[in-house]
Structure formats: C-alpha cells, structure tokens
Image: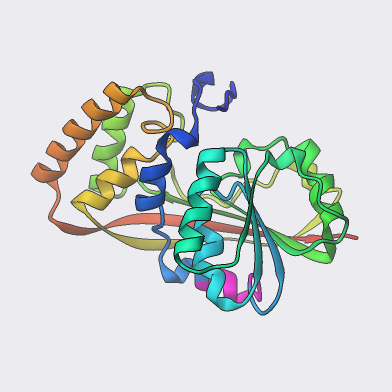
Amino acid sequence: MIIDKGIDGGKAFDWGKTSSDYAKYRDIYPQEFYQRILDEGLCRDGQKVLDIGTGTGVLPRCLYSYGAEFTGTDISENQIETAKRLAAEADMDIRFMSIGAEDMDFPENSFDVITACQCYFYFNHETLAPMLSRILKPSGRFVILYMAWLPFEDRIAGESERLVLKYNPSWSGCGETRHPIAVPKAYGEYFELEKNEVFDLQVPFTRESWNGRIRACRGIGASLSREEVEAFNLEHRQMLEAEAPEHFNVLHYAGMAILRNRK
C-alpha cells in the first residue's frame, strides 16, 4: 500500500488490489510506443535491462523478443506474482523481484539500461538517483516513459474521467495535457538529459477493454472498496453503451525522457 500526500490527497492505493484487471487490460501500448524505444538502441540485442515499477511486467514481456536480458522489480507482491505467471505462460526467461525501488541492492555496473514506465512519480528520487547511477554501467541510460489519455480532446476519455472523479474526487491523475516529462532535479548531478520528447498515439479499444482499462486505474481499482468498484463498473458500462461504438480509438500522448549516466 502506498500513501503519498502529493498523490490523490494522501488517499491510500495498492496496485495489488487490481492485479487481475491490470494484467488483462493495461497491456495497451501500441507498437509505435515500443518502436520509439527500440529506435534509440534500447532494450535489445543482449543488453541487461532493469525495469523498475514493472507492475505485471508489461514492458519486459512486450520487448522480450528483441533480445535484451530483463529484470523487473515492483513493491507489490501481487503484481510480481502475476508478472511471473504471465512470463512463464509465454515461456519467457525474465527475473522478477518484489522490492521497493529505493531498497534495491544490485551490484555496481549491473545494467546497460534502466526503465521506469508509468511510475516515476512514485519514487523517492533523492535516494534513487545515486543508486541508479551506481548500478548502471558507465554511459548507461535511464529511460522514463509515460502515456496518458487526453480528456479535453477525446470525448470518451473525458466522460470516463468525469465518472472516476464522481467515485473518487481526490484522484489527482485527471486533467492530463501534453507536456514533456518533468525530470526531477535530483538526477542532474548523476545524469545528462539526452532526449525528452512527446508524441501522440491513437490507442484502440473495445467497450470491454476500455472499461477494464479505466477500472484498473489508480483512482478506481487500486484505491476503492470492492462495492465502490462494482458500482463504478456498472455506471461506466452504461455510459459506454450510450456514448461509444463497440470499437473506437482513444487519443493519448506519450513522453520519453532518456538520461545518460555521467560516470
């Protein structure tokens, strides 16, 4: 369980509560998202890659075929157990560990690349920045990745967000607009910013998969009671039946910041 006064007004959330939905509905990044990573020469061809805040291992599993050797860590035991199961079912040799990012103790120069997808704002960066520099090889790269829907430009996303706020008014993950990733100042001493780009993505959904995606967000599945989640699920499905076709795209933007280790 995570409690942070700067997130959702300090309301507790636990990604482990929504692991089943997370595994089924959060693997939504389109190929263009992964291709941007690969085009930078990252997460491929024998590189040793650490994915922190890995959740159910979406990034390692989706990039596994490109030849990197992946390790994934996450503070949630439920998420890691789900990641292990999904990797085993796909016959993927990925090492997963349940540990908080700040508590990792890998040897110096262990990794060529470290990734943090959709999770960098949950970390204590003053602790993490020197640790990542230490366990990265010289000139190794730390890649911060993020993707979010655009509720003021996409009607369905806006309606869904309105319902999330109805059930969880303290949810602070709302109102996204395009912006580069805000790299915390703590990394400046240890890393050089190599690239920080933003790009749009059209992400395909069905009514069921979008309903699952929203249910698996922090504001619903990770923080509400089972009864509240069920009530939201019913009302959200009714909204989609009235407002959305069976198949549709949701406009998202993505950000990728690449930091090169100074040592």
Q: Answer above or below: position of 75 versus 58.
A: above
Instruction: Please name whichever residue, 41 or 69, is drawn nearer the observer in this view of the structure.
Output: 69
Left or right position of 63 against 113: left
Residue 57 percent across, percent down from the top left: 53, 55
Q: Residue furthest bottom?
A: 45
For the magenta stretch, what is the residue range? 35-43
Comparing 229 with 71, the one in front is 71
Colour scheme of the rendered structure: rainbow
Which residue is at the front of the view, 195 or 27?
A: 27
User: Residue 168 location, x and y as percent?
Assistant: 36, 23
Identify the residue at image location x=59%, y=67%. Answer: 93
Residue 97, horizontal then vertical, whole percent: 65, 48
37 is within the stretch colored magenta: yes
Please name the residue shown 53% across and 54% down the image: 84
Confirm whether residue 152 shows in the render.
no
User: Can residue 84 be found in the magenta stretch?
Assistant: no
The quadrant holding residue 115 is bottom right
Q: Position of residue 175 (x, y in %)?
A: 40, 37
Q: Name the image quarter holding the N terminus.
A: top right
Q: Quadrant of the C terminus?
A: bottom right
Quarter where residue 128 is shown: top right
Q: Is residue 115 above or below residue 168?
A: below
Q: Is residue 137 visible?
A: yes
Residue sticking out furthest to the right: 263
- Residue occupying the point 32% across, 41% down: 214
Q: How many marks?
A: 0
- Residue 163 versus residue 205 in the image, above or below: above
Q: Is residue 167 above or below residue 99?
A: above
